[in-house]
Amino acid sequence: MGKILILENKLVFERKDELMVIEAYGENCLRCRITRNSKISDESWTLLPPKAAPDCTVNGDEKEAIISNGMISAKIEAGNFWYGGVVTYFRKGKQILRTKFEGDYTSNYVHREGDHYQIKVIFSANDGEHFYGLGQEQEDFFDRKGTTCNLLHYNTKSALPVIYSSLGYGFLWNNPAPGRCELTKNHTMWVADSAYQADYLVYAGETPADVMKIYCDLTGYAPEFPEWAAGFWQSKLRYESQEDVLAVAREYKKRGIPLDVIVIDFFHWTEQGEWKFDPRYWPDPKAMFDELEELGIHPIVSVWPTINPKSENYHEMSEGNMLVRTENGQYGIFEFHGQQTFIDVMNPKTARFVWDKLKNNYYDYGVGSFWLDEAEPEVHPQQFANLKFYLGNGAQTALLYPYYYAKMIYEGLKEEGEDKIVSLIRAAYPGIQKYGAAVWNGDILSTFEALRMSVKSGLSMAMCGIPWWNSDIGGFLMGDTESEYFRELIVRWFQFGLFSPIMRLHGLRQRQENYKSRHPGIIEESGGDNEIWSFGESNYPILKNLVELRSRMKPYTLKYMDIASKTGKPIMRPMFFDYYQDEICYTLDDQYMYGEEILFAPIVERGQEQRTVYLPEGNWINVFDKKTYSGQQTITCSARLHEFIAFVKEGSDALQIFDNVLK
């Protein structure tokens, strides 16, 4: 039946084949670890050391005991063989979670290898509860109640095993093993496919903002956001040469369009795994970056973590165990212009080696920001148990890859004295925000459906503590810039981009009929044109106006990015984040707040020019007609293609941003 041991700030429960420890971990937070092994591991993965827990109390006996830490408490019942080991969590005395057995407790441990098991933690479901978070993927759900989620990364999916509950608590599954989360009507279940122990944290606050602050105390805060990143980013797949980049930059300057960032995409290099410009097409990188600096344009350069035996670095890195290896078979785990493997960013030696290359071949020329593509990493087939990382087998550690990828770049730039670091990255894991990660949702389709799902992705990532987020404006794949469909889509996506943490135009556009590469034989030809003048004469003034508006919004964006870096509050936030006492706000997944003062309701359906908007308490001013509407009502709004739907809270200075918005 087992018994409970009461220690300072900690409860220990042990019985045959199971050992559990619940302890205070900072303020208003409890950490629970459970294993079938004979001792608990102290591995914390990406968790930061906890703050003191001055409000922690522990009392009870060997049959039943309670640990309380501020607003959160947990009760362990020793019980008997059939019922023993039940844990109930309370927020301010009200039950929020209770463990559930589906079979006996030993069925939660299925042996994999050595001292690793497939591990399950199961809780009873709560009627009426809403869940938000779990990262991003191409699914049409913001409220995750009633859904299941595979905890793994791939292109368009980042698994962040953290949720916020409408009952006022957060839950962090602290296991970097691929697995599964089920938030269904019959239970809430977390699964690690191969792990030494279950490890999770439950934390509570008075408001969603309080809960987010605890999460950031656990995993880290985003650093200071630079001014250049708050403007407009220009990108495409891809600029083939130095002259192509400069021609676009000069054209923006000639037209008087504010451009803050230009991105140089992949295959500007000599070979995958060499991290340097191909001198045939990029003969003088320093001169290019010097001119961009004179134009006031910040460059970002794409780097990939792929490498193959043709690379001049392959032999040294392979023999030095700096590459992701396989448990069975040879190096090839990604086919793209030949078989590739990936650098092992979890290995400190790899990080040092690769950063030195990046410094010599990019940073010293004037590149202070990088685009970290393929960050999942993208392996095929997705058999993570076949991958060998510095930190262990992929079945136990694979989800950590993007975290260490961003860490490698952040620490390298920090070493050079940089203090405002932004890295565009395609995958994420809890804690990555502290390394300046600006996450985007991958190679999504150029469709209205993808736009609609991107709104939900951005809100979900916000509830995972990722304040720097963006999507490819227009989507990435299959965009026909000559079609009426895409020309409508690009405007509506630009409007969404205006109220996204980062406004970045990117995509692989279908080539125009007269397209001809200026560099025949180049390994990766460019896609079609993707500048704001590329989408039709009638669209151009609309998009130019939106880019100019984004420039005027910079002080507002930076204000709330600064708040995010200090408190964890995201700038793109669900309606319930600030209006948590309004039950309607928990049901809204297609409108959101951009900071505390601007409410944005995107149009995400083709041909749509009307939609309903819910206004929470207070008075709200429409940014176009300047009419004031009282809150706590649903209204119908109109927006022709050149218009968008946004409201400013009465009394806010933000209304001035939208003066002459229809010019």
Image (cartoon, rainbow, N blue to C red):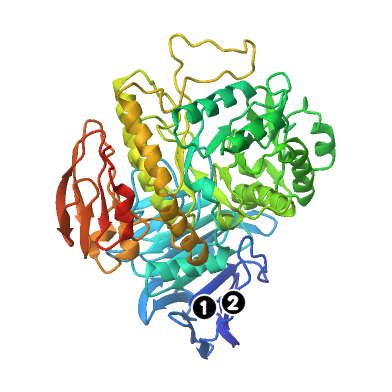
Amino acid on which the number 1 mark rests in the picture: Glu
Amino acid on which the number 2 mark rests in the picture: Lys
User: Which residue is the site of mark 2?
Assistant: 51
- What is the crowding at mark 1: few (fewer than 14 residues within 10 Å), some, or many (at least 20)? many
Q: Is residue 563 visible?
A: yes
- Name which residue lies at 27% across and 47% down: 601
Side of 616 where 240 appears, left or right = right
Name which of mark 1 and mark 2 comes first in the sequence. 1
- Name which residue lies at 67% across and 52% down: 418
Q: Foreground residue, 188 or 562?
A: 562
Q: Are marks 1 and 2 in contact (CB under 8 Å)?
A: yes
Checking the image for residue 27, the label placed there is 1
Indicate the secondary structure of the residue bearing disc 2: loop
Image height of 414 relative to 57, above or below: above
Residue 297: percent from the left, percent from the top? 56, 37
Q: Is residue 105 visible?
A: no
Q: Foreground residue, 23 or 4?
A: 23
- Name which residue lies at 66% across and 26% down: 268
Tell me the quadrant of the picture where the C terminus can be found. Answer: top left
Residue 308: percent from the left, percent from the top? 74, 29
Indicate the secondary structure of the residue bearing disc 1: loop
Residue 314: percent from the left, percent from the top? 79, 32
